[in-house]
Amino acid sequence: MGQLLQHFLLKGLLFLILSHFLTQCVSSVLRSCLDSERSALLRLKDSFILNQSASDDTLAYPKVSSWKLEGQVGGNCCSWDGIECDDNTGHIIGLDLSSSFLYGSINSSNSLFQLHHLRRLSLSNNDFNGSEIPSAIGNLTRLSRLDLSWSGFTGQIPYEVLQLSNLVILDLSWNQLELRNPSLKSLSERLLNLKHLDLDRVNVSSTIPQSLANLSALTYLSLVACELHGKFPTSFANLTQLTYLWLPGNEFNPDTLSWLAKLTKLTSLNLDSTNSSGDVLYSLKNLTKLIYLDLSLNQIFERIPSWFGNLTGLIILHLGGNEFWGSVPQSIFTLKNLVELDLYGNHLSGTYKLETFLNLKKLKMLQLSSNHFSLLTTTVIDVTFPKFTLLTLASCNLSKFPDFLLSQDELEVLDLQDNKIHGFIPKWIWGLSAQTLHVLDLSENFLTGFDLPIVVPQWINLKLLDLRSNMLQGPLPIPPGSIEQYFVSNNLLKGEISSGICNLTSITVLDLSNNSFSGMLPPYLGNLSKSLSVLDLQNNNFSGLIPRTCEKGNTLRMIDLSQNQLNGHIPRSLVNCNMLGFLNLGNNQIEDTYPSWLGRLPELRILILRHNGFHGAIGEPKSNEFPKLQILDLSFNKLTGCLPSRHFQILRAMKVVDLGKLRYFEVDVSFVGRETHWPIYFSYSMTMTKAGVELKYEKIQDFLVAIDLSSNKFDGYIPKDIQILQALQFLNLSNNFLSGPIPPSLGNLSNPQNLDISQKKLSGEIPQELVQLTFLGFFNVSYNQLIGPIPQGKQFGTFGNNSFEGNQGLCGNPLSKKCYPGGLSPQPSSLSKKDDGEDSWFQFGWKAIMLGYGSGLVNGLILGYLFNPMKHKLFVKYFGRQIQSRRKGRMN
Ligand SMILES: *[C@@H]1O[C@H](CO)[C@@H](O)[C@H](O)[C@H]1NC(C)=O
Ligand SMILES: *[C@@H]1O[C@H](CO)[C@@H](O)[C@H](O)[C@H]1NC(C)=O
Ligand SMILES: *[C@@H]1O[C@H](CO)[C@@H](O)[C@H](O)[C@H]1NC(C)=O
Ligand SMILES: *[C@@H]1O[C@H](CO)[C@@H](O)[C@H](O)[C@H]1NC(C)=O
Ligand SMILES: *[C@@H]1O[C@H](CO)[C@@H](O)[C@H](O)[C@H]1NC(C)=O
Ligand SMILES: *[C@@H]1O[C@H](CO)[C@@H](O)[C@H](O)[C@H]1NC(C)=O
Ligand SMILES: *[C@@H]1O[C@H](CO)[C@@H](O)[C@H](O)[C@H]1NC(C)=O
Ligand SMILES: *[C@@H]1O[C@H](CO)[C@@H](O)[C@H](O)[C@H]1NC(C)=O
Ligand SMILES: *[C@@H]1O[C@H](CO)[C@@H](O)[C@H](O)[C@H]1NC(C)=O
């Protein structure tokens, strides 16, 4: 936030100066325009539709509406809006149609390209519907200024642009353009008069050409996210006239920016996400004219240099997302002009009075979250405190709500997550910045309740309220009707859900999990499902029937009602949940037949019905059932009949092994505000019985493939075709009435880590083929009627007695009963297809994962445990904001 503002302020200024010029010209114009050019303009006007959504600038208006023959100015097109004529010849030399609601395609036949005398052309902020830049642009050889930014152009920039050798200003930013043939190199070899070059978001995908340094007149160079890479030519030191240099979002080689030291005229420098290291700091010492400095999201592992205090002109200072350490030098607090100070996500430490920061009276944005700060709150109420719009003080060891917040009436984002604030939420919070507040995060504190009587929240624009992981008691507080995301999980809230919740018609995320709410679920949950994408009510005391939840046209992606006391049938309306990926109804008292109709949900990836009263046989599947299912947990029910072997054949998603990416099952419910982006990924969580123990997983790797059919009443044989599920990592068939032999084909599974088939009636030998299961971490066949030698070698060496006990006929290690006289056993390796088990770990891309997250992974089937979920969240929070601030969307 703010970067864009600054960007546009600068651009806007330029625009104002130019339009001032234009107005001056127009008022002094006496000449009438030429007939041919007038008719070209009228045809130009007719070639587009006026469409309000084509320009998103608040000052936009349809300039061409004033272009008509009748009326006061009549046919003199020199006085039409956006037109500038030459005083002497009457030729049109300037055309400014920026932000004019123009919508439609444009090509070289457009009459625009007959205006050969044009020197200045701006079509910025319209929507040319994905047109390519017409090659006829090359005919306008007199152009000195060309602005086609934000206008929906696509494709390769035409070669003809290189004919415009008089160009001084060229702005092609924020389209979907490519600059490869011609390349940035040829452009910088031909357009030698350029002073202002803006190619933001143009896909250049090359190294920086040496020839760019030829453009010695450049004062403004902006190359945001151009897919540039490699070394910076040290020649760049010749661009001494530069005042504005933006390079964010390009992956340069580190330490190739020393030439910056020579650019002493720089006022605005943005190196966000450029792969820069600490060395870059030394190049900045002499840049005393800097107003804007952004070094966010790099790998700077340094103290904040105290000479930053010499950059007295600084208005914007962004250092977030680096590895700055040590204390904040006092000199920073002398930068009285600072409007934005961002230190988010570093390793900075120290104890500071909050006033120290508040003495920077011009601050509007302050980000101190995720360092090792301790902030001492102030009791002084000073009317001259800065008025913040964005304030993030997460993990700052605050012990109470800072009083100065009382004076804040312009806040849009307030983040106090993970502090040590105890006690009641004071009443005044409910009216804090009532008109402006969009995001309020008070999660992970020690808040116990609300200062009574509960005041109705006065926020009219609040979109996100996060009260997770406190100690809140009492009934559910109902947020204002504007709310989109509401999180109150992990508190001590109780009672029934008030009907006020049905007024939340914009809500997309409702997370009430891990509280003590009781009573029936509100019958109108279905109404909310039109906007909801996440409904998480797990681990409460809700009882009664599950209401209709999925109205037609719903967007639900996740429903978790597990660990309640819900009963009755599953509502058949669930079949309308076309986008549902996760359904967890486990640990309730649902009495229903096996809901095979859920197989019609096209996006369902995880289905958990464990610990209920599901009964009956599973039956024959339809061929297209469960196209994306990866995790199926039907354990602890009363299901009967044969194991669903045909199901094993059709579960398509389970057959594909994809271990390449480290991702979780999650729903992207990121909050997108006017200027902010607050990435939130809502992770699926679940409980599984692993190695005989119930474990709760807060996050689930999205490559996990698991079937748990244990503790039912299935009978018959273990089907041979289970091996078709190549991706299966977890299989639990224990505690059924299965009988007969263990199929040798189980040995063909490529990577199960858990195999539990303990029963009462399995017979025959344990197939030697199972030795090939090198991933196997848990194996249990206890209490059956198995006979013969236990396979030896590989993982089998790691299983203890209890994996095999209770089988009279088994012999060999680890049991004391020997199989052969003298203890000899057959050579297991002759049966192994893969000689080196470790190779198979790596061939699916596990290596990268292991390097990143350490050896704990070997046993960590589900990686949620290994992560500090909070760190993860904070990082993405920050990162996303950065990306978003470069997104299309403009100020002014
Ligand atoms: C207006 O423009 C938007 C895109 O900018 C387009 O999606 C929409 O269809 C247009 N409407 C009309 C009526 O042309
Ligand atoms: C926009 O582009 C689409 C696809 O190329 C085309 O079908 C449509 O007619 C265009 N609309 C206008 C108004 O030019
Ligand atoms: C250019 O656009 C006009 C309409 O604006 C269309 O009639 C003409 O066919 C197009 N020419 C080409 C070469 O696509
Ligand atoms: C542009 O220039 C080319 C070559 O000089 C010419 O053939 C073409 O007609 C011109 N186009 C327009 C629109 O003037
Ligand atoms: C840019 O172009 C390169 C080369 O064609 C391509 O690989 C890359 O995906 C493009 N980047 C974007 C963001 O489109
Ligand atoms: C930089 O400028 C110097 C002196 O004007 C000149 O000799 C040198 O060739 C220039 N370097 C580049 C890469 O343009
Ligand atoms: C900064 O300026 C001083 C004096 O003008 C000069 O001696 C020094 O070399 C410059 N530093 C860098 C890194 O260029
Ligand atoms: C910063 O300013 C102080 C006082 O003007 C001066 O003594 C010091 O040398 C300056 N530091 C740098 C690195 O320019
Ligand atoms: C729902 O909103 C309406 C209109 O704003 C209000 O009158 C009603 O009291 C609200 N219902 C509840 C239960 O809060």
Image (cartoon, rainbow, N blue to C red):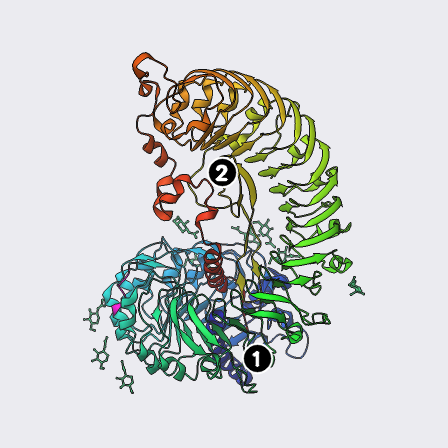
Q: Which residue is mark 2?
A: 704
Q: Quadrant of residue 635?
A: top right
Q: Secondary structure at mark 1?
A: helix
Seen in the image, is 243 located left or right of residue 20?
Answer: left
* Relative to 780, residue 494 above or below: below
Can you say whether 84 is above or below 473 in the image?
below
Ligand 4 quadrant in view = bottom left
Instruction: Look at the magenta stretch and give its main secondary structure.
Output: loop
Mark 2 Cα within 10 Å, few/some/many (few <14, many 20+)?
many
> In the image shown, does 529 or 718 lie closer to the viewer?
718
> Residue 443 or 465: which is nearer the viewer?
443
Image x and y of residue 529, in percent: 70, 50
**Residue 396 drawn in magenta:** no
Residue 583 % position (x, y): 63, 41
Dot 1 beta carbon under 8 Å from ligand 9: no
When asked about the image quadrant of residue 185, the answer is bottom left
Task: Tell me residue 57's x, y (percent).
Answer: 57, 69
Number of other residues with Cα within 10 Å of mark 1, as a class: few under 14, some 14 to 19, many 20 or more = some
User: Which quadrant of the rendered structure holds the C terminus?
Assistant: bottom right
Is residue 256 on the magenta stretch? yes
Residue at the (25%, 72%) spot, across then down: 238
Total marks shown come to 2
Residue at image coords 56%, 21%:
760
Per the rendered image, the range of residues in magenta is: 254-258
As drawn, is 814 to the left or to the right of 537? left
Q: Secondary structure at mark 2?
A: loop
Label 2 beta carbon less than 8 Å to ligand 5 = no
Q: Is residue 681 above or below residue 301?
A: above
Residue ID for mark 1: 403
Q: Which is nearer the N-term, disc 1 or disc 2?
A: 1
**137 to the left or right of 593:** left
Mark 1 vs mark 2, CA separation in Å: 48 Å
